[in-house]
């Protein structure tokens, strides 16, 4: 499985590692992903998702069903 948030679609960002002498080498800035068990009210069960920490915070305000609908995800598959 890829390193991607299942609700927001966030993934790694290309960047440079810059040394003291200002030599630049390519590196990746990975997303802070967490494997999280979230309670789904509509299905009355737990759902295990790989989420970014930003998505975890947003679930607290918007709700899981709203975010899943925006992402086009069917929660019955998880």
Image (cartoon, rainbow, N blue to C red):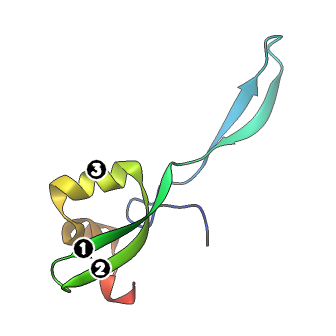
- Measure the C-alpha gap from mark 3 to mark 2: 17 Å
Q: Residue 32 in the image: x percent, y percent?
A: 50, 48
Question: What residue is disc 3 on?
Answer: 57
| Residue under numbered circle 1 | 39
Closer to the chain start, of discs 2 and 1, is: 1
* 77 relative to 12 in the view: left or right: left
Number of marks present in the image shown:
3
Give the answer, above or below, for where 24 lies relative to 63: above
Residue contact between numbered discs 3 and 2, judged by CB atoms under 8 Å: no
Query: How far separated are the C-alphas under marks 2 and 1?
Result: 4 Å
Residue 48 position in % (x across, y down): 40, 75
What is the x, y in percent for residue 69?
A: 25, 73
Determine crowd level at label 2: few under 14, some 14-19, many 20+ residues with C-alpha closer than 10 A.
few
Which of the numbered marks, if any, corresponds to residue 46?
2
In the drawing, does residue 37 fall left or right of residue 16?
left
Task: Determine the residue positioned at 24% across, 58% down.
Answer: 59
Image quadrant assignment for residue 71: bottom left
Residue 63 rendering spot, x and y as whole percentages: 18, 63
Does the CB distance between marks 2 and 1 fall below 8 Å? yes
Quadrant into which the C terminus falls: bottom left
């Amino acid at each position: 499985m890829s390193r991607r948030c299942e609700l927001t679609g966030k993934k790694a960002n290309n960047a440079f590692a810059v040394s003291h002498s200002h030599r630049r080498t390519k590196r990746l800035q990975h997303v802070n992903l967490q494997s999280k068990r979230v309670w789904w009210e509509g299905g009355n069960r737990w759902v295990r998702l790989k989420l970014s920490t930003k998505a975890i915070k947003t679930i607290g305000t918007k709700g899981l069903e709203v975010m899943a609908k925006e992402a086009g995800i069917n929660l019955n598959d998880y």
